[in-house]
Amino acid sequence: MSYVSSTIGRVLDQINRSYFLPAIQRPYVWQPEQIVALFDSLLKGYPISSFLFWEIRPERRADWEIYRFIENFRHGDTHNEMTEPDGRDVMLVLDGQQRLTSLLIGLRGTYAVRAKYARRHNPDAWSRQRLYLDLLKDPATDDEVSDDEDLGVTYGLRFFEGEPKSSAQHLWLKVGRILDCTSDDAFDRLKDEVLDALPDATTRAQTRTAERTLDRLYRTVWKDGVIAYYTEKDQSYDRVLDIFIRANDGGTKLSKSDLLLSMITSKWAGVSARQEIYGFVDHLNDGLVARNRLDKDFVMKSCLVLCDLDPRYKVGNFTTANLARIEANWTRIKASLEATLRLVNRFGIDGETLTSLNALLPIAYYLHRIGSGSLDGSTPFEATNAKRIQQWLLGSLLNGVFGGSSDRTIGTARSILQETLKTERDFPHRTLAQGLASRGRVAGFDANNIEGVLETGYNKRNCFLALSTLYDANAWGSAPHHIDHIIPRSLADRKALMAQNLSESLIERILDSVNRLGNLQLLLARENLEKSNLPFGQWLQTRDSTFLERHLIPNKPALWQVSALPDFVAEREELIRRRLRRLDLEPASTALSEPPPLSESAAGN
């Protein structure tokens, strides 16, 4: 390979004019401290590795989706803007996007960060910051302890929202001002301006430091050929794809979805697959009633499952024929996945409590096949099947049915659904439970796994899931619900217990019991706030006569005292055991003794 060198200033001048990004590139991910470290390395004269560009011939420009570099970046954003390169020479960056974007942000743009705990969609929560250089900071001394010392940063580089105030110890220069120095005369004028602004008390050593640092910045941006790049001219997409994968293998690993998105984009006619899938993921995560945590990998794997293709998420399964099949079904795939998320969100399951995305795939496949929306109506069919799906999903999540390598589990579940839906439209929750159990994936509850559920304590991620199995209701997402301590936790404080002259052994048992599942229930948020720290017996007087039965609480007032908490938890856990054993996940008597075999396409020969 023959490499060419250029200056940062010349290359930067061509970004978003001739230099763009292909759809295959991943989003920008660098943090501000990485940008600072890059500029520190450049000022020290360190190499920053080579770059790889791809020259697109004018007649091939329309064949590829082309994106702009981000100049003003907001932390957490994942999308570059598409552009039309008509009338321009086009060079696509295959290796070096993170570094070039960082140079662009540091010299010409901004990096916006969000205040801690502030809401993302609040415009006042964001601080747009620019990169500044302290010209009085001598990189050869260690007089100050820098926040970036772990990265070896010794130049005085920092991001600020507004222009920082200079003093006798600090002379701040916005790094981007060096871009105006397109000639030696322009640089001399900047240098005179900066040095003339130094306070009278500035020492000769400080003045020399400022001059050296400013000279170093000028040489780094406009004189030294620090950008070494190779230009690939071959127009073969397969060759370039192979080069891209190899070039990126040593850095942040190329995700499978990044590669597949580029393949889909090159095959789908008139549709931006990248924009479609990114936008759909954003919609599922932020556009529904609950907040979810899906990613593009899940959506693309769902395409394979719902189109009856080999469910293994690998590049070889996204052939031209399979991509055409996915494209033809894309509208229905989106509708099925959205219906699935709306349904499980109605169960109160969201990004915080959904412990396995793959557990959604059999549900999505079922809704895809029957085309009945999210089962949110009140007909017997909708109510019955929503309840069946909820019980099966809770059992699958609590028992880790889709944990580990789950491709075979997904294929088995899909085969069972394919077979049963030939003769019926109901969700086959018991047949699924039996078929997966024969593969060692148990969704039901017996003596072997009930105790594991009972060990699910307060603050565990699956605590809500475990508690929701105790109730007949399934519309937990219709109103906010809280996990409540039946016997208030505040009453089980060690000091309060010692004041009752309880023995140390009993106090330890109480403390061990207070956060167990047996002392937890689900309440409407307003009910939980009303209950607060009231003793349970006192608060119960404000409830209806069926409250104890609905919440599986022993009707024994003597156990509602904090001193009896271990016995209360023991009795309530026994009620929970009985409830779990009665869940409708026992195998149907007419179910197949073995799950149907995988179809040829699903078996993944």
Image (cartoon, rainbow, N blue to C red):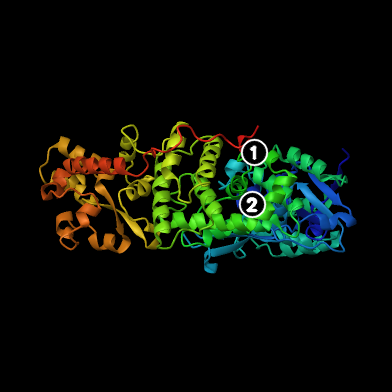
Relative vertical location of residue 285 with respect to residue 225 in this rendering, above or below: below
Q: Find residue 338 and report its image quarter.
A: bottom right
Image coordinates for residue 431, horizontal then vertical, percent: 44, 40
Which residue in the rendered view is the most extreme toward the front? 423
Image coordinates for residue 505, horizontal then vertical, percent: 16, 35
Image coordinates for residue 40, horizontal then vertical, percent: 68, 47
Q: Which mark is residue 156?
A: 2
Of residues 429 and 481, the one drawn nearer to the viewer in this rendering: 429
Residue beneath disc 1: 601
Q: Find residue 513 and report its image quarter.
A: top left
User: Exactly how many numbered labels are in the figure?
Assistant: 2
Query: Which residue sits at x=23%, y=60%?
Result: 531
Q: Which mark is residue 254?
A: none
Query: Which residue sits at x=70%, y=37%?
Result: 250
Badge 2 element:
strand
Cα–Cα span, label 2 and label 1: 59 Å
Of residues 560 and 188, the one drawn nearer to the viewer in this rendering: 560
- Quick one: label 2 or label 1, which is nearer the N terminus? 2
Dot 1 amino acid type: Ser
Badge 1 element:
helix
Q: Residues within 10 Å of mark 1 (few under 14, many from 20)?
A: few
In the visual, does 278 lie left or right of 25?
left
